[in-house]
Image (spheres, helix red, strand yellow):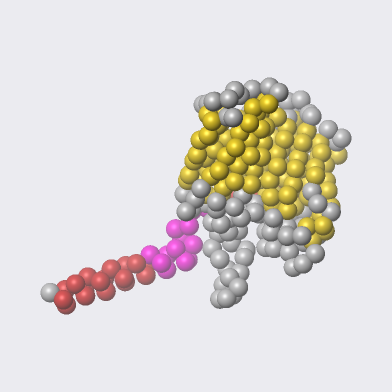
């Protein structure tokens, strides 16, 4: 169900990362348009971004982040071929992660 | 034989519905799977309380060293692109707030030693309101705000 697409590019001494996570990001506040019932909450609560084994960025999110979250960030250093990993955990305890090499 | 199987099925579904009931009653729903996820901050219904809970103070000073980009008019309130940049040395975190949402605190990013002060993401907006970027350094908060007009209905953020 879940996919993470990552693109990491090294340029001028820093690495620029853009990512797209497939996730419904249900806040628990949205009503189903047919039944009128609230759709149960299920949203990503934590995203951890690593370069090699080092945590570059740790994000905590609410259900107010858009469906299929887009996240871009930058960090100092990083060479082509180095691994960049993004992993997430949602409010139901589901997790996923993906790793790419810096271009 | 058939009867036995049937009984097992009936029993199974009874057990399942009992669990369903417990879940519906909220007894089994974890408040948060992650100990580090700050429920008090993310469930706060006003920006001041959210900031107090997440960052230890609600006082923030507008700063030119924090910049926020977002559209004047949100064509799609379910996905509003927000870009935050900061030049502040030793910035520890960047938090993003949609002031008009039921739960205004949307995201908080802890910056590792290598992280540059740059975050871009899409947020949901319930109504026309300021989107505020708050950067923490030491005991102080620095901020920038951008008003975003939400045309249609908005979205339950």
Q: Is residue A84 visible?
A: yes
Does A66 lie within the magenta span?
no
Closest to the observer, B101 or A50: A50
Residue A78 percent coordinates (x, y): 61, 24
The residue at the point 80 percent across, 42 percent down is: B68
Q: In this view, does B123 lie to the left or right of A49?
A: right
Q: What residue sits 68% from the left and 26% below the top?
A: A11
Instruction: Give the vertical position of B125 relative to A96 (above or below).
Output: below
Instruction: Tell me where the magenta segment starts and ends, as one range.
Output: B19-32
Q: Is residue A5 above or below residue B154?
A: above
Q: Is residue B117 left or right of residue B145?
A: left
Q: In this orientation, which residue lies closer to the viewer: A68 or B2?
A: A68
Q: Residue A31 is drawn in which quadrant?
A: bottom right
Of residues B32 and B96, the one nearer the viewer is B96
In the image, taking residue A1 as reference, residue B46 lies left or right, namely right
Q: Which picture quadrant has residue B127? A: bottom right
Does the magenta segment cover residue B30?
Answer: yes
- Please state the horizontal and vertical placement of residue A3, each as a whole percent of the image: 51, 48
Q: Residue furthest left?
A: B1
Image spot of residue B157 (x, y percent)? 67, 59
Classify B26 as above or below A53.
Answer: below
Q: Which of A19 and B27 is in front in this view?
A: A19
At 82% from the left and 57% from the top, the residue drawn is B73
Residue B1 placed where, x, y %? Answer: 12, 74
Residue B49 in sight here: no
Tally of numbered tags: 0
| Quadrant occupied by the C terminus of chain A | top right
Q: Residue at x 55, y 53 (%)?
A: A23
């Amino acid at each position: 169900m879940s996919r993470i697409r990552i693109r990491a590019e090294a340029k001028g001494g820093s690495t620029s990362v853009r990512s797209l996570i497939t996730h419904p990001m249900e806040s628990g506040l949205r009503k189903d348009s047919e039944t009128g019932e609230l759709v149960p909450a299920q949203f990503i609560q934590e995203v951890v971004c690593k370069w090699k084994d080092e945590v570059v960025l740790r994000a905590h999110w609410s259900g107010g982040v858009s469906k299929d979250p887009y996240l871009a960030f930058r960090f100092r250093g990083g060479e082509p071929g180095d691994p960049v990993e993004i992993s997430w955990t949602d409010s139901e305890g589901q997790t996923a992660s993906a790793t790419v090499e810096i271009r | 034989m058939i009867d036995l199987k049937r009984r097992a099925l009936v029993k199974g579904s009874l057990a399942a519905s009992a669990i369903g009931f417990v879940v519906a009653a909220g007894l089994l729903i974890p408040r948060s799977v992650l100990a580090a996820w700050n429920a008090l901050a993310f469930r706060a219904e006003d920006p001041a309380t959210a900031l107090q809970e997440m960052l230890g103070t609600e006082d923030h000073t507008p700063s030119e060293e924090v910049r926020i980009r977002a559209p004047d008019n949100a064509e799609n309130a379910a996905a509003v692109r927000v870009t935050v940049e900061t030049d502040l040395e030793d910035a520890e975190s960047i938090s993003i707030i949609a002031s008009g949402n039921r739960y205004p605190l949307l995201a908080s990013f802890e910056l590792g030693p290598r992280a540059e002060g740059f975050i871009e993401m899409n947020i949901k907006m319930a109504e026309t309101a300021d989107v505020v970027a708050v950067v923490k350094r030491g005991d102080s908060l620095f901020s920038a705000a951008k008003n975003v007009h939400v045309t249609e209905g908005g979205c339950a953020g």
